Amino acid sequence: DDARLSSELLGMDGASYGRYKSLRGDWDFGDFTLTVQRVQSDPFAPPSRVRVLVPDAGIPESAWADPVRRRATADYLGRRARGLLQGSLLKIDTGGQEVIERSSCRLTDGGVELRIGIDLPGHGRRIDGRTAERELCRTLPALVDDLAWEEVDAAEAEAFADSVADTVALRDQLADRGLVAFVADGAVLPRLSGVSDRPMADGAVPFDSPESLRVGVDLPHRGAVSGMGVPEGITLIVGGGFHGKSTLLHALERGVYDHVPGDGRELVVTRDDAVKIRAEEGRRVERVDVSPFVRNLPTGADTSDFRTENASGSTSQAANICEAVEAGSRTLLVDEDSTATNLMIRDERMQALVHGDREPLVPFIDLVRPLRREHGVSTVLVMGGSGDYFDVADQVIMLDAYHPHDVTERASELARGRTDADFEAPRARVVDPDSVDDTTARGRGRIKRRDMDVLVFGESDVDVRSVEQFVDPGQIVGAGLALRRLVAGRHLDGTRTLTEALDSLEEALAVKGVTLLGDDFGGDYVLPRRFEVAAVLNRLRTLRVADQRRGG
Ligand code: ADP
Ligand code: MG
């Protein structure tokens, strides 16, 4: 077939661009199969899509038998492929600093499957058959040859997988040790800049754990490692402005993902149910039970069944917390820099001036302990501006010129008694599956993203700028595909609660892997977490909740 494709492409040279469509289908190259899945209609349309299946690339069983190493090795090979394709018209999607399962490069048992984009070349509206022939019949086979295990730096590939395996092993130990996070000694937390996620190059102060919080762990490849364990419960991170509080919290937000060797955060891990909470003025809220946080509103609205097209800072943050818990999170990460102050604290003088019955908001400080006690939800909170949280914190970590100190004792001397509010389990929601539909007015499915800001889902634009644990553009597309799958796979069936639907989808993904989300999808996508899937659903302006259930 390769000779046939070659003569086909050379024969098309100069023909009208639409003839490229005739390439669709399978081309057998002997040691691999090229499938032309989608052909762009003109040179300016989104790239065409091809799939390359190499049944035997000589990849040893040790690299693919275990699911973690399989993901890591696929990621490693994807990055290698990207390097090899520099300067070519073939483009492969790869990750940044995180190692997350993606559609572009997957391992089979011993082989590799690639999904690649190609801008099919043209001279205006005429086919450039010579260039197309070079890309598909020479560059591509050369790529396949270079991904064969005997061509790969096996030691480097193994070290990459070892590093990811250690990260996963470390994260898996957190729950048994009663920790929500771990930050290894020597970790490099600060990043190069606000727009680069690479490690700070010069002047980074490596992490050094305070003795009282130091924990030793044994990892399968690296062996003994020490670092700071962040215990379950309520952890306060304090310190002067610019002393590194937000940088630490950001590292914990990202600690739900695995990082590439050399990132500096390979051994910074957080429980995988951790969700960053923030205020998000203007978002829509659909029938969320925010009654623990919001009681008698001046409008008289029922806050156990709360809906708004335009939430305030405080109600949006309350909804974000209730939704995170509904989606299954038991670890909340909060930074004062992005919260609504009136939902966080209310000091004595304000209480004296504005009486309880005039204030609909119950501040987080009165609910953070009941959340922990009754619902097992831990919180890690950055708060440099108020000492009120000393009253409720189980441990207080102070950052001083980027060095952490355990100041729990000092803080508890300054603490005062405080009466908690009640946190009744919020009502669980049953989503109407018909309200989750990516069909456009023209009757076609549409899922795409605009930068890291918007998921386009059918006729809806979903604003995801405040969903901070989206770290890879492909996850946004992946979350859109997961919404489609929630409905198509009948996980959302009009009777299951949202929590149950997410459990059900997650089980299916664990078996089938990321391509369950869109085997024929004409683009790249990355496995989203259930929390980001829920976040996208909750921000969908068409979402309708059919029912609420107690005790869900
Ligand atoms: P805070 O939240 O306490 O005000 P930030 O976390 O925003 O402080 O950090 C302030 C600055 O210090 C940032 O520019 C950050 O990159 C830098 N920084 C943070 N941690 C370190 C570190 N360990 N070493 C060097 N610079 C750091
Ligand atoms: Mg800060």
Image (tube, grey):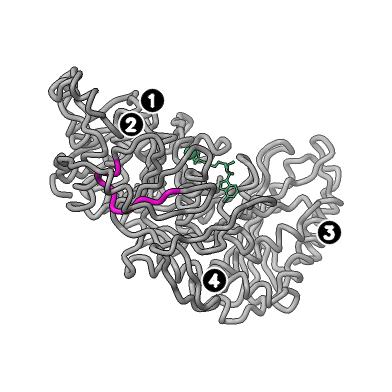
Q: Which residue is mark 2?
A: 316
What amino acid is labelled 4 in the image?
Answer: Arg
Q: Nearer the viewer, residue 336 or 484?
A: 336
Instruction: Estimate the spatial distance between the alpha carbons at disc 3 and disc 1, rounded to whole Å.
Output: 57 Å
Image vertical order of residue 357 relative to residue 16, above or below: above
Q: What span is in magenta?
A: 389-398
Q: Residue at x 47, y 53 (%)?
A: 404
Q: Which residue is mark 1?
A: 282
Q: Secondary structure at mark 1?
A: loop
Instruction: Estimate the spatial distance between the alpha carbons at disc 1 and disc 4, rounded to whole Å.
Output: 41 Å
- The disc, 1 or 4, on the residue closer to the chain's N-terminal end is 4
Q: Provide residue 80's location: percent of width, then percent of height.
A: 70, 63
Q: Residue at x 58, y 57 (%)?
A: 206
Q: Residue 528 got which mark?
A: none
Q: Provide residue 185's location: percent of width, then percent of height.
A: 52, 64
- The disc, 4 or 3, on the residue closer to the chain's N-terminal end is 3
Could you tell me which quadrant the N terminus lies in?
A: bottom right
Q: Nearer the viewer, mark 1 or mark 4?
A: 1
Q: Nearer the viewer, mark 2 or mark 4?
A: 2
What amino acid is labelled 1 in the image?
Answer: Gly
Few, some or many residues within 10 Å of mark 2 (<14, 14–19, 20+): many
- The disc, 2 or 1, on the residue closer to the chain's N-terminal end is 1
Q: Are marks 4 and 3 in contact (CB under 8 Å)?
A: no
- The disc, 2 or 3, on the residue closer to the chain's N-terminal end is 3
Q: Which residue is mark 3?
A: 7
Left/right of residue 368 with respect to residue 13 in the rendered view: left
Residue 271 visible in this rendered orientation of the protein: no
**Residue 390 magenta:** yes
Q: In the current view of this chain or complex, which residue is farthest to the bottom? A: 61
Q: Which residue is mark 4?
A: 70
- The disc, 2 or 4, on the residue closer to the chain's N-terminal end is 4
Q: Quadrant of residue 148?
A: bottom right
